[in-house]
Image (cartoon, rainbow, N blue to C red):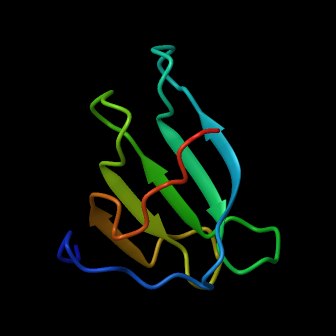
Amino acid sequence: MTDPQEIIETRGDDRVDLLTKDANGDGKTDVWVSDTDGDGKPDLFQFDTDGDGKVDVTMVDLDEDGTPDVIVDGDGGLPPTPPA
């Protein structure tokens, strides 16, 4: 695991949330699946595991092969965009 204070590398500098989901029905987003390089494929996955609405685990799939290349505690310096 990487230092949670370090900003982790993604495939690109943009962020388009492809999916946000309230998985436990508490009204707060628990899962974020994002594309960071504009190809329409997810490469950034973030999860709220304790129900507080904040990212607890971040995974990045740099080569988009379905296996995370980087897993960190926290948002990895990539906080989700708050809902409008």
Q: Residue at x 59, y 39 (%)?
A: 83
Q: Residue at x 36, y 48 (%)?
A: 55
**Residue farthest toward the top in the current orientation of the protein:** 25
Q: Is residue 64 left or right of residue 44?
A: right
Q: Is residue 24 left or right of residue 34?
A: left
Above/below status of 76 relative to 18? below
Q: Residue at x 20, y 73 (%)?
A: 5
Measured as percent of width and height from the top left, residue 19 is found at: 69, 45
Q: Could you say which is closer to the camera, residue 3 or residue 67? A: 3
Above/below status of 53 relative to 15? above
Q: Residue at x 51, y 33 (%)?
A: 29
Quadrant for the C terminus, please.
top right
Quadrant for the N terminus, please.
bottom left
Measured as percent of width and height from the top left, residue 13 is found at: 60, 83
Measured as percent of width and height from the top left, residue 51 is found at: 33, 27
Q: Is residue 36 left or right of residue 72?
A: right
Above/below status of 79 relative to 10? above
Q: Is residue 59 left or right of residue 42?
A: left
Quadrant of the rendered image containing residue 65: bottom right
